[in-house]
Every structure is written in C-alpha cells, then in structure tokens.
C-alpha cells in the first residue's frame, strides 16, 4: 500500500519545528506502524537525510516508549494498543497520516517525535514505591489478599507509563497515570505504610511538573493502551483528600 | 503555606472547590424549580408572589442565598483559574486532533457553557433580583397584606420573544453543563462506586440535565404564550 506521511520534524528543543511530507510506496499492510517508520528512516538515510527520531524499545506493548500522536489520536486510531501494536492495515491505501509528538508543557520535545518524559520518573520517585526490609525474602503468600483487591491492584499496575493519557487530555493532565500508581499501592496491604504520604507527595509533584487539572472528559481512559479505568482517578481523589484531612503533615 | 491553603491551591483542591460549589448550585436548582412552578398556576400570580415574599424574608433562606451568590462567584473564579492553568499545560497544540473520538463535547466545553451561564445569571438577576430588591415593583394585596407583585415583572419580561429565546438557549447550556458537571462533581470528591455511580449518572442526565432545564425553559415559553394571548 501507499501512504502519504506528514511527520513533525524538529532539530532540538529550542528549534522551531514543522510538519514535513514524505510519500512511501510498497508498504505491507502487515507492517507495524514503527516498521513503516523504519522503512521511511531507511529511505531518508540512503538519501543522506536525517532519519526521524522516535522512542521505541520493546515493540510489543509493554515498555510504553513508542509515543506518537497519529491522525489526531494518541497511539493512532486503535484503542487499547500502543503505536508498536498498530498495524498499517488500520489505514486506507493512499491515506494521509499526520504524526506528531506528545504535546504537553511537562513533556518537552527532545527531537522530532521524541519527548522528555522524566516528569513521570520524578512523580514516581516522590512516592510511587513501597518500603521493604532487606534480608531474607518474605514468604510469597504470607499476606492474604482477596481476589478482588488483587485484581484491582493488577488492573492499575498494568500502566506502562507511556503518557498517552497526558497526550490525549485536553488539559495535558497526568491524572490517570498518577491515579494508577497511587491506586495500585493504596489497595494492597504492602502499600499501607506510605499510603497518605504517597498521595500527598505524588499529587504535589504532578502539579509541580506543570500538568493540567482533571476535567473528567474520560479521553485518557479511552486512549490508554491498558484501558486504565477512571475509577482509579476517583480513588486517588479520595486518597488525597483523606490524606490531607488526616495526615500529620501540617 | 498552611496545609489548608496548600490543599485548596493544588489541582485536586481547586477541582474540589469547583465540585462543591457546582453541586451546591445544582441543589439550589431543585428549590428554585419547585418555587417557580407556582408560575404555572392560573391565579394572577398570587402563589408566586407569596413564595417570593417568603424567599426574601425568611432568615434561613436569606443566609443560604448569600452562600449561593458567593458560590457563583467562587465557581466562576475557580473556572477561570483552572481553565487558564489547563491551557498553559499545553503551550504548543497539535496540528490535527480528533477529540470527538474519545470524549463528549459537553465535557470539553464546560468553560464556554459556564460563560453562557454566567452571562445568563447576570441578566436574570438584573431583571428579577435587582428589581425585587432595588427597583420599583407594583404592589398587590392579598387578605389585607401587601406583597411586591413580582409576577407582573415576570409577565412583562417574558412577553418579549427575544428575552424568552435567551432563556431557552441558556437552559440548553445549563443542560449540557450539568450532563457532564453533575456526575463529574461526584468523581472529583472521590464518590464513585459500582452501586451508586449509575444512579448518580442517571440522576444527573435525566433530572438535572433534561427535566430541570426543560421545566425552566417551559416557564418563559408558557408566560410568553399567555401574555400574548396565544393560550388562555
Ligand atoms: C457562573 C458561571 C459558571 C461558570 C463560568 C462555570 C464553569 C465551569 C467549568 C469551567 C467547569 C469545569 C471544571 C473542570 O472541568 O475542571 C464547571 C464544572 C461544574 N459546574 Fe459550572 N460553571 C458555571 C455555572 C454553574 C452552575 C449555575 C452550575 C449548577 C447549577 C454549575 C455546576 C457545575 C458542576 C456540578 C461542575 C462539576 C465540577 C467537577 O467537575 O468537579 N456550574 N463549571
Ligand atoms: S495510564 Fe495508560 S495512558 Fe497513562 S501512562 Fe499509564 S498506560 Fe499510559
Ligand atoms: S515500543 Fe514498547 S510499548 Fe511500544
């Protein structure tokens, strides 16, 4: 199949960027979107042009690196999938495909389609952890956890930190990401020690990074490759308010 | 900063203020609606005037009404602060986006809908609230007691087609604001539960976003038809 690409090209964070058009023939409908970009980069390299810089790693939907805003949607037209899980058969022959980087104040463009998502790392460092004793490993099934709680925690733990929620949100809000992390640990017994501090610190760090507030449009959950539920946002709000009202931190 | 100001100035805290003021305003709609249904009575406005007398003289209602004015101001101010912050969170926008693929129009346009509501509230209060408190309203006498005849003011206002049109459009905006706002308000304060969220969503959609705005819009239409002798 043929595609007509319009790809965001930007030398570095300070340079002005623009959409540049590229035409590709002989694209297999079975290629993943990233493989199609590989083909483009092969052609650009042969011509002596700079290849398109983009993030990727696992190429199987688990690392969360492949951030691309495709035809007006985070990770393209499919739901419940990352860019690496998107195939060219999702597009029409001859279709124009616009590819842009995630857009958020907290995610500055590094180059072309690559953005700096270390804001997420700093949010994790602020409270997205549980403390454990070093020494011999505890018995795996020592603490009984009900099936419903385990499922709830696992659903939240599926978040791969891709940032599609931020990219899709009209406010560039990181609520779904932070909520998944807060929720995941708040429901488990292992997460209780830092429970209130976690909610307070992670929300404070989220605000400090310059993400927007939540308007509950639900766009995040629709575009999330792991379909993280809005329930977690409500839980985080509960955790945060509860922590603010009752914690010892004045 | 104390923990209180810090909480209230966080993104979550600001949304909590939006939610509490918004839900309080929503609860007021029910009271306002119940009272204004008196307009549908064919009694030359007596029941309506007695109701407005009660609303402007009962100390509890008067206290609540000041809370209400404050809520409107705080809600609108917080809306402005949040909207500006949210806009600044994406300084460079996408060249092409398809928000309709993942979210409802009303949820993305709360600020515009709210601005329509703010203009409406100012107009509405100028026409009725201001006249009632500071204007010259004709008097009516029931059982030897004097009442301000606000019903006459209502008749005059709603006999103009363009005024009625403004009300109908504003009530459509209210419906769209609340179809998202009512259930979102509960989410913001963390009230989401398998058992109750479907009820909240149904209440928000059918009662707050459809029934109440429709009844409010029916009032000016009814009075218009009556004042212009289209109906008896
Ligand atoms: C005075 C003019 C108004 C303005 C400028 C305004 C603006 C807004 C905005 C921008 C939001 C969304 C906040 C967000 O997405 O983060 C909102 C939410 C809301 N508004 Fe209004 N609004 C107004 C009047 C009203 C009225 C009259 C009511 C009720 C009768 C109301 C009820 C609500 C509710 C329940 C919410 C949901 C709060 C939440 O999402 O947590 N608003 N308003
Ligand atoms: S919540 Fe979903 S969209 Fe957001 S970072 Fe996690 S996996 Fe990605
Ligand atoms: S490259 Fe790892 S999720 Fe796409």
Image (cartoon, coloured by chain):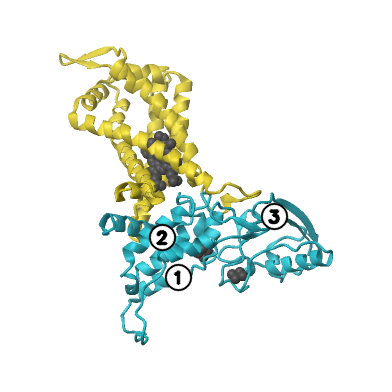
Of the pair B221 and A48, the residue shown nearer to us:
A48
Q: Check disc 2 and report the residue beneath it.
A: A202
* Mark nearer the N terminus (1 vs 2): 1
Q: Is residue A165 visible?
A: yes
Q: Are marks 1 and 2 in contact (CB under 8 Å)?
A: no
Marks 2 and 3: CB-CB under 8 Å? no
The secondary structure type at the circle numbered 3 is loop
From the rendered image, report the letter of the chain displayed in yellow: B
Rendered hue of chain A is cyan
Determine the residue positioned at 47% across, 32% down: B116
- Which residue in the structure is indicated by mark 3? A10
In the displayed structure image, the side of residue B76 where residue A225 appears, left or right: right
Residue B8 pos. (x, y %): 34, 47
Who is closer to the viewer here, A107 or A35?
A: A107
Seen as rendered, the residue at the extreme right is: A47
Please give the name of the residue rendered at 42% of the width and 26% of the height, measured from the top-left corner. B221
Which mark is in front, 3 or 1? Answer: 3
| In the displayed structure image, the side of residue B91 where residue A92 appears, left or right | right
> Could you tell me residue A38's position as x and y percent?
73, 68
Q: In this view, does B16 lie above or below B57?
A: below
**Which corner quadrant holds the C terminus of chain B?**
top left
Q: What element carries label 1?
A: helix
Pointer 3 or 1: first along the chain = 3
- Labels 3 and 1 within one chain: yes
Reading the image, the residue beneath label 1 is: A157
């Amino acid at each position: 199949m043929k595609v007509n690409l319009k790809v965001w090209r930007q030398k570095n964070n300070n340079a002005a960027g623009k959409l540049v058009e590229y035409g590709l023939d002989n694209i297999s409908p079975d290629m993943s979107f990233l493989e199609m970009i590989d083909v483009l980069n092969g052609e650009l390299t042969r011509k002596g042009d700079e290849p398109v810089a983009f993030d990727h790693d696992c190429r199987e939907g688990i690392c969360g690196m492949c951030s691309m805003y495709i035809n007006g949607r985070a990770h393209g037209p499919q739901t419940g999938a990352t860019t690496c899980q998107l195939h060219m058969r999702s597009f029409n022959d001859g279709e124009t495909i616009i590819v842009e980087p995630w857009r958020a104040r907290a995610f500055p463009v590094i180059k072309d389609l690559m953005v700096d998502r270390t804001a997420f790392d700093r949010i994790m460092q602020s409270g997205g952890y549980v403390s454990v004793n070093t020494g011999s490993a505890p018995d795996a099934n020592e603490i009984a956890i009900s099936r419903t709680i385990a499922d709830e925690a696992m659903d939240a733990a599926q978040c791969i930190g891709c940032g599609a929620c931020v990219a899709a949100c009209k406010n560039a809000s990181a609520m779904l990401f932070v909520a998944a992390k807060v929720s995941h640990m708040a429901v488990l017994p292992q997460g209780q020690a830092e429970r209130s501090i976690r909610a307070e610190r992670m929300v404070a760090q989220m605000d400090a990074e310059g993400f927007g507030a939540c308007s509950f449009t639900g766009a995040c959950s629709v575009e999330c490759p792991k379909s993280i539920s809005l329930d977690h946002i409500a839980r985080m709000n509960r955790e945060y308010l509860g922590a603010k009202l009752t914690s010892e931190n004045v | 900063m104390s923990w209180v100001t810090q909480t209230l100035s966080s993104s979550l805290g600001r949304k909590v203020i939006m939610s509490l003021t918004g839900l309080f305003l929503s609860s007021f709609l029910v009271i306002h609606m119940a009272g204004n249904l008196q307009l549908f009575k064919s009694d030359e406005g007596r029941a309506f005037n007695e109701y407005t007398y009660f609303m402007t003289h009962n100390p509890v209602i008067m206290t609540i009404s000041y809370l209400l004015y404050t809520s409107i101001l705080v809600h609108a101010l917080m809306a402005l602060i949040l909207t500006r912050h949210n806009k600044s969170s994406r300084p460079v926008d996408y060249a092409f986006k398809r928000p309709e693929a993942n979210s409802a129009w009303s949820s993305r346009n709360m600020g515009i809908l709210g601005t329509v509501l703010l203009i409406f509230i100012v107009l509405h209060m100028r026409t009725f609230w201001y006249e009632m408190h500071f204007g010259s309203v004709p008097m009516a006498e029931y059982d030897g007691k004097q009442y301000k005849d606000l019903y006459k003011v209502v008749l005059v206002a709603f006999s103009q087609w363009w005024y009625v049109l403004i009300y109908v459009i504003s009530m459509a905006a209210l419906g769209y604001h609340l179809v998202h706002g009512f259930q979102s308000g509960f989410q913001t304060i963390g009230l989401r539960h398998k058992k109750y969220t479907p009820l909240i969503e149904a209440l928000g959609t059918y009662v707050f976003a459809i029934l109440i705005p429709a009844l409010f819009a029916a009032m000016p239409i009814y009075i218009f038809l009556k004042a212009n002798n289209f109906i008896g």
